[in-house]
Image (cartoon, rainbow, N blue to C red):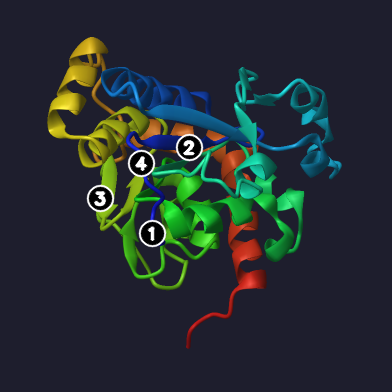
Amino acid sequence: MAKKTQKKGKRIGIVLYPTFDSLDVIGAHQVFHYACRYHSDSEVLLLGPDPKDLQHDKLKPYLAAAKKGEVVSGEQVKIAQDITYQDYLNDKKGRYQLDLIYVPGAMDTSCPLYYSQKMADNPFFKVLEKARQEAEIIASVCTGALLLGTAGLLAGRKATTHWMTATLLAQFPQVTLAAGYPRYVVDQNIFTGGGISSTIDEALAIVTALFDQQTAEKVQLMMQYHPDPPVKGGDPAHAKPEIIYEVSRHETPYTPGFSAAGDVFLYYLKHHEIPS
């Protein structure tokens, strides 16, 4: 990691892109927001695409929101970005230098691929590369791990993702898929989270690492996060077989986030030489 410029607080960046999962972002943002309230010299920044990044036909439905500085989630929630990718990439004075970069999953995780078919010109992957050089922690949740894998950031690491894309993550060379269905996995400075709701657990673990355990405990209490769900089937190890079947049958054909996840891996294959 590159040497950091002198600054007191922590700066957390969450990278938005069209069709991101709402809870992936909002859950983590809620945790990070409260952590920054206890460390007032710290801040959370939401990074989003510039309208010029959305010229591909697949992305044009999101142009109107982008012109207003908003990014649309897969559930049609519009979130205002603080800065664009280019603001971050063009920052030479350390105004936006990040201590943590956080990549959510999405209804259609392939969306960032359409910014540019050449990885070297793709602003999303340029953001990840810059963050790799300066951030203390790099994190993803849900299918965001596929994007970290495509950027080569999971090489030699153990990682997790949404249970429906776990077998695909395992295909990335030099990536070790964590056994079972963990809420999150930590491998040195890389954090990867499981499916959507894992964002809160993972974000609390990140706060512990980035700040301290007491801050995480304060945030957890403030959010009254002590889950006791009325049903106990939140991952395939605990769900009924017929429920797993129905969810898999329904989601795979109709949710682009899973059917297009393979496109992310193909993009990886196009831009990386596979080790023999």
Going from the N terminus, do you reach mark 4 or mark 3 first? 3
Task: Name the residue that disc number 4 marks.
Answer: 194
In the image, residue 97 above or below residue 76:
below
The CA distance from mark 2 to mark 1 is 18 Å
The CA distance from mark 4 to mark 1 is 31 Å
The CA distance from mark 4 to mark 3 is 10 Å
- Residue at 14 percent across and 32 percent down: it is 213
Residues under numbered marks 2 and 4 in contact, where contact means CB atoms less than 8 Å apart: no
Q: Secondary structure at mark 3?
A: loop
- Residue at 76 percent across and 20 percent down: it is 68
Q: Secondary structure at mark 4?
A: loop
Q: Nearer the viewer, mark 3 or mark 2?
A: 2
Q: Secondary structure at mark 2?
A: strand
Horizontally, is 267 left or right of 103 in the view? right
Q: Position of residue 19 (x, y in %)?
A: 63, 32
Task: Name the residue that disc number 3 marks.
Answer: 180
Q: Quadrant of the N terminus?
A: bottom left
Identify the amino acid type marked 4: Gly
Horizontally, is 207 left or right of 257 in the view? left
Residue closest to the eye, 82 or 272: 82
- Residue at 30 percent across and 54 percent down: it is 189
Crowd class of label 4 (few under 14; some 14 to 19; many from 20; radius 10 Å): many
Q: Nearer the viewer, mark 4 or mark 3?
A: 4
Residue closest to the eye, 266 or 72: 72
Q: Secondary structure at mark 1?
A: loop
Q: Position of residue 60 (x, y in %)?
A: 84, 34
Q: Which mark is residue 13?
A: 2
Task: Name the residue that disc number 1 marks.
Answer: 3
Going from the N terminus, do you reach mark 4 or mark 1 first? 1
Quadrant in which residue 266 is drawn: bottom right
In the image, residue 159 above or below residue 12:
below
